[in-house]
Image (cartoon, rainbow, N blue to C red):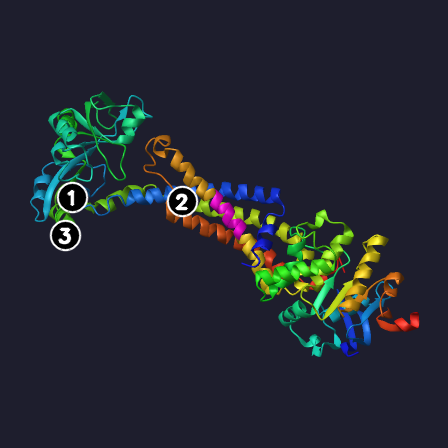
């Protein structure tokens, strides 16, 4: 471009001011990128069950209300259901309450049929199955507490008066979930049957054909509609989204904070850009005198201001991307953010926002410069 | 000589708040091609306004401004800008170079508006800087040049497109006597050797003496016209 030198030289004519503006914009876009990435992480978590031919069955009253174990056999008989499994949330912690993570009692023999997205090396899975007090654990938890296979762990129950004493038999791998803890349902039930009395939190049903998910879901709920324990059946994605809905306000809060931050950066950038335009009134008048049209002045200044916005945005966004590559956020947030990073969509969103910031902040100063009368601009020098 | 600039009964009235301030009152002037005209007069006499009208950066309230057979007072802003790019070279009192560009880039600026290729632009810039005697300073930034040298770069910028007319407002007003002398020599050289038509506003009688033709304005009207021969 013929005018690139003019644009770039103007952009860096006051190096300190440009540097400070870039650092400020970079800091704000780092923050915005982080918030948007957390939202994207939540979104990914709520979509984690997408594509799984698995239905979750819980009480129609609430997730906290248990279902009778007898429901399982009836669900299993529905045509199209391949297998079912019981899953109980235990709500236990390790040593201290701050060491909290997702821990479940699960049908140990259904890992390959119902929970096949959790892959565990065959020998480790066999060891888990063979040991009634065995456990399989996510890699992030293993790293966080320095555990290794064979370690004996005691969890402290909160919901149930039961402190599972288990031996880690395997480490699973999963696309999104890297910090859960699974023990045998039999072991859990044996210890808590006086309280649970033939009930369990949820059932999970593997369905043969994904097209039948809605139909089977309806069949399950219809089957128990008039029973003492009516059910509500979800696809796994809906089940995850139910959890995410609980933090829906956080999403709104993050969105509002992001927008406020961007608005703030627009104001700050507008101030800088107004100063930059103001100190160039005479130069703009000279450019117009020698033949630059109003449109050219407007375009050149907008390109300059949008470039400044993009540079600030890129500094913050790519800075965040690089930072979160170096820092293990799963460890920092104790498993709250799993597989956290800045995805390309967030990068593009932030860069687009940065360009818009440049356009909005620089639009008015650029327009005022473009509309400046040559005579008025030159009045100082003629 | 053919007439290059024709000013026909031009009036200019500025609005200041709710007041009308008449600056030019029915001026008619003809400037022949190849002339070196000096406009003189006290402050507020309207000489700069007249220069602005000839340069196409302002429009008369009434009357016609015709340059090279084109009525520029009838052109809209965009057409005027395009016209200025090819027909007018500006020389300012304070030089008004772009501080972030070096001498070469400053002189190249008007050529960016043409269809010339980079190599052609380079050739034009080099030759303009050679004419003003700064062919060896192309990489110097304005802050690295003296006032006289800055004005020479500004003159190179003004002539690089080979414009029809050069307009200068107090081109020596910010210079020491020696530099002013050199700049006036250069303007005379451009007029004599390159047949450039120059219209210059000045307060300085010594500067006006270099012109072929002097017009005196007062309170928006022409009060006196002197030709070189008459002054000699």
First in sequence: mark 2 vs mark 3: 2
- Main secondary structure of the magenta stretch: helix
Above or below, comparing residue A146 to residue A56 in the picture:
above
Q: Which residue is mark 1?
A: A230
Residue A212, label in figure: 3
Specify the subunit that label 2 lies on.
Answer: A
Specify start and end residues of the magenta stretch as a single range: A307-315
Tag 2, which secondary structure? helix
Name the residue at 63% across, 61% down.
Answer: B123
Q: Which residue is mark 2?
A: A36
Residues beneath discs 1 and 2 located on the same chain:
yes
Above or below, comparing residue B164 to residue B133 in the picture:
below
Tag 1, which secondary structure? loop
Name the residue at 41% across, 41% down.
Answer: A321
Of residues A27 and B113, which is closer to you in this image? B113
Tag 3, which secondary structure? helix
The answer to which quarter of the image holds residue B216 is: bottom right
Name the residue at 69% across, 57% down.
Answer: A282
Q: Is residue A96 left or right of residue A76?
A: right
Specify the subunit that label 3 lies on.
Answer: A
Question: Could you classify mark 3 by the number of other residues whose Cα lies within 10 Å: few (under 14), some (14-19), or many (20 or more)?
Answer: some
First in sequence: mark 1 vs mark 3: 3
């Amino acid at each position: 471009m013929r005018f690139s030198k003019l644009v770039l030289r103007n952009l860096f004519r006051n190096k300190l001011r440009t540097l400070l503006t870039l650092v400020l914009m970079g800091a704000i876009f780092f923050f915005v990128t982080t918030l948007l990435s957390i939202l994207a992480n939540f979104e990914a978590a709520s979509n984690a069950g997408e594509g799984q031919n698995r239905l979750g069955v819980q009480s129609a009253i609430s997730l906290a209300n248990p279902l009778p174990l007898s429901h399982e056999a009836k669900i299993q008989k529905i045509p199209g259901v391949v297998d079912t499994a019981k899953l109980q949330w235990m709500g236990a912690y390790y040593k201290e309450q701050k060491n909290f993570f997702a821990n479940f009692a699960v049908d140990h023999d259904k890992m390959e049929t119902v929970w096949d997205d959790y892959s565990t090396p065959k020998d480790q899975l066999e060891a888990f199955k063979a040991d009634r007090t065995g456990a399989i654990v996510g890699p992030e938890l293993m790293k966080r507490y320095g555990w290794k296979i064979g370690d004996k762990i005691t969890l402290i129950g909160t919901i149930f008066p039961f402190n599972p004493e288990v031996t880690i038999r395997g480490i699973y791998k999963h696309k999104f979930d890297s910090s859960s803890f699974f023990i045998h349902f039999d072991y859990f039930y044996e210890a808590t049957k006086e309280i649970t009395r033939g009930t369990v939190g949820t059932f999970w049903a593997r369905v043969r054909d994904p097209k039948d998910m809605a139909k089977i879901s309806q069949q399950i709920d219809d089957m128990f509609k008039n029973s003492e324990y009516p059910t509500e059946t979800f696809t796994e994605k809906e089940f995850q989204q139910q959890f995410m809905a609980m933090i829906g306000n956080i999403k709104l809060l993050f969105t509002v904070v992001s927008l406020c931050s961007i608005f703030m950066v627009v104001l700050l950038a507008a101030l800088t850009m107004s100063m930059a335009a103001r100190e160039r009134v005479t130069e703009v008048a000279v450019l117009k005198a020698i033949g630059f049209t109003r449109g050219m002045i407007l375009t050149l200044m907008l390109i300059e201001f949008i470039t400044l916005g993009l540079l600030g945005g890129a500094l913050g966004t790519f800075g965040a991307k690089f930072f979160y590559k170096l820092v293990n956020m799963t460890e920092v947030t104790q498993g709250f953010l799993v597989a956290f990073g800045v995805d390309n969509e967030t990068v593009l969103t932030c860069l687009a926002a940065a360009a818009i910031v440049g356009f909005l902040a620089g639009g008015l100063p650029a327009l005022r410069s473009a509309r400046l009368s040559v005579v008025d601009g030159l009045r100082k020098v003629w | 000589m053919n007439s290059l600039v024709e000013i026909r009964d031009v009036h200019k009235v500025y609005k200041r708040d709710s007041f009308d301030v008449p600056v030019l009152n029915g001026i008619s002037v003809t400037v022949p091609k190849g002339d070196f005209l000096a406009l003189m007069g006290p402050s507020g006499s309207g000489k700069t306004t007249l220069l602005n009208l000839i340069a196409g950066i302002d429009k008369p309230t009434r009357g016609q401004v015709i340059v090279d057979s084109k009525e520029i007072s009838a052109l809209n802003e965009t057409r005027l800008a395009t016209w200025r790019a090819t027909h007018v070279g500006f020389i300012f009192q304070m030089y008004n170079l772009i501080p972030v560009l070096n001498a070469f880039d400053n002189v190249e600026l008007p050529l960016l508006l043409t269809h010339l290729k980079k190599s052609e632009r380079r050739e034009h810039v080099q030759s303009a800087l050679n004419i003003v005697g700064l062919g060896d300073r192309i990489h110097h930034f304005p802050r690295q040049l003296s006032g006289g040298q800055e004005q020479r770069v500004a003159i190179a910028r003004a002539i690089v497109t080979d414009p029809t007319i050069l307009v200068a407002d107090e081109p020596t007003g910010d210079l020491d006597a020696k530099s002013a002398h050199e700049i006036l020599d250069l303007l005379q050289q451009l007029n004599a050797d390159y047949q450039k038509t120059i219209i210059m506003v000045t307060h300085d009688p010594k500067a006006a003496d270099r012109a072929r033709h002097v017009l005196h304005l007062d309170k928006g009207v022409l009060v006196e016209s002197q030709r070189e021969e008459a002054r000699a």
